[in-house]
């Protein structure tokens, strides 16, 4: 598998970064995950804009302009021998080459590390979509800058593991009585025919999929509201969805062991998934 590291395309096994890289020492970096369907990156402009926002958030200069990112990403995607891909982009603050080798403040004159690799994109199967998935809830104990797509994902990793330990797909996070998001996804609630989404803020990452879902809801006249969603509304939801670039739209049918709504994927989840699949096809053909 060919990856990209600091200007070179090379086999993954040959790609090496310094043990002093601040991504390793401090989690001092940001990332993006871009889906590519039939080798066409989906919503790349949006992902590059969010990457810029994340870099701004950690005060790291963007090593490339959008055209240079685009060129590199397209070449990386073209190097793989599979069609549908999940492209990971990692940018860290690099490694100090002179003492102090490990020091919290930003080192001077250090080049960032830019690493990209692609994996086969495996979205939910028809059977998984038909069955839905289960989720657990947990207190959102992350920092207050969750809008930055930071590589420092320890809190998300621990939260997500709680779901895995319960043989579930996702952990739905609640902070101060309100829904924030999933450990690695955004969460939507349907109540009385209205699609509810928490508003973008520093308490969650605004997903590219989240944006697409709200665009599709607006375009197709699906009643929706972007507003704080209380824990009680989550627990009394008719439908609950998780969304992300890799999971797309997936119905959560059981929360903390209790059925969500009728305990099967709801009609709006199925409609939104169909709209999303059609939209993807249109974009990819364009
Ligand atoms: N994560 N919120 C969090 C905390 C996430 O990690 C993700 C996605 C999302 C959804 O964003 P998007 O729709 O742009 O994928 C929301 C990716 C897939 C990951 O970390 O692997």
Image (spheres, grey):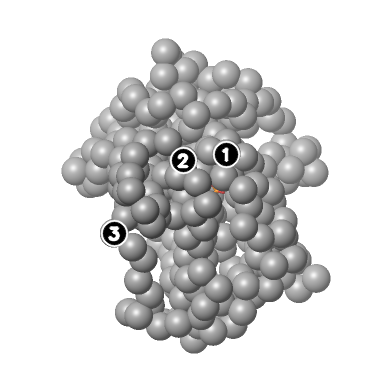
Report whether residue 164 is seen: yes
Q: Earlier in the sequence, mark 2 or mark 1?
A: 1
Q: Nearer the viewer, mark 2 or mark 1?
A: 2
Crowding around mark 1 (Cα neighbors within 10 Å: few <14, some 14 to 19, many 20+) is few
Q: Is residue 10 left or right of residue 58?
A: left
- Front-most of residues 82 and 17: 17
The residue lying at 62 percent from left, 40 percent from top is: 56
Residue 183 in the image, given as x and y percentages of width and height = 39, 39
Crowding around mark 2 (Cα neighbors within 10 Å: few <14, some 14 to 19, many 20+) is some
Q: Nearer the viewer, mark 3 or mark 2?
A: 2
The residue lying at 74 percent from left, 66 percent from top is: 67
The Cα atoms of the two marked residues, 2 and 1, are separated by 9 Å
**Is the CB atom of the residue marked by disc 1 within 8 angstroms of ligand 1's nearest atom?**
no
Residue at the spot of label 3: 19
Residue at the spot of label 2: 106
- Front-most of residues 169 and 95: 95
Residue 143 in the image, given as x and y percentages of width and height = 41, 26
The residue lying at 31 percent from left, 27 percent from top is: 138
**Is the CB atom of the residue marked by disc 2 within 8 angstroms of ligand 1's nearest atom?**
no
Q: Earlier in the sequence, mark 3 or mark 2?
A: 3
The Cα atoms of the two marked residues, 3 and 2, are separated by 17 Å
Crowding around mark 3 (Cα neighbors within 10 Å: few <14, some 14 to 19, many 20+) is few
Mark 1, secondary structure of its residue: loop
Q: Examine the rendered structure and indicate whether residue 223 appears above or below residue 8.
A: above
Q: Quadrant of residue 34?
A: bottom right
Residue 50 in the image, given as x and y percentages of width and height = 63, 46
The residue lying at 33 percent from left, 29 percent from top is: 137
Q: Which mark is residue 222?
A: none
Mark 2, secondary structure of its residue: loop
Residue at the spot of label 1: 59
Tell whether label 1 touches label 2 (CB within 8 Å): yes
């Amino acid at each position: 598998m060919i990856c990209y590291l600091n200007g070179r395309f090379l086999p993954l096994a040959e790609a090496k970064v310094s043990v002093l890289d601040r991504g390793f020492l401090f989690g001092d970096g940001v990332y993006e995950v871009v889906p590519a369907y039939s080798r066409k990156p989906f919503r790349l402009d949006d992902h590059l804009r969010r990457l810029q926002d994340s870099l701004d958030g950690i005060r790291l200069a963007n090593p490339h302009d959008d055209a240079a990112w685009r060129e590199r990403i397209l070449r990386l995607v073209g190097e793989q021998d599979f069609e549908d891909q999940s492209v990971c982009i990692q940018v860290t603050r690099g490694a100090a080459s002179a003492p102090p080798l490990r020091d919290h403040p930003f080192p001077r004159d250090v080049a960032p590390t830019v690493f990209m690799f692609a994996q086969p994109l495996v979205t939910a199967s028809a059977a998984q979509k038909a069955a839905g998935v289960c989720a657990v809830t947990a207190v959102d104990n992350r920092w207050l800058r969750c809008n930055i797509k930071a590589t420092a994902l320890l809190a998300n990793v621990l939260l997500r593991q709680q779901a895995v330990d319960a043989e579930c797909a996702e952990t739905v996070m609640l902070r101060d009585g309100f829904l924030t998001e999933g450990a690695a996804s955004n969460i939507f609630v349907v109540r009385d025919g209205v699609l509810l989404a928490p508003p973008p803020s520093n308490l969650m990452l605004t997903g590219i999929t989240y944006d697409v879902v709200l665009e599709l809801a607006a375009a197709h006249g699906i009643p929706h509201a972007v507003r704080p969603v209380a824990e009680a509304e989550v627990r009394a939801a008719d439908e609950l969805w998780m969304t992300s670039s890799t999971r797309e739209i997936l119905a959560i049918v059981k929360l903390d062991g209790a059925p969500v709504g009728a305990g099967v994927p709801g009609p709006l989840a199925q409609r939104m998934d169909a709209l999303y699949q059609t939209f993807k096809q249109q974009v990819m053909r364009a």
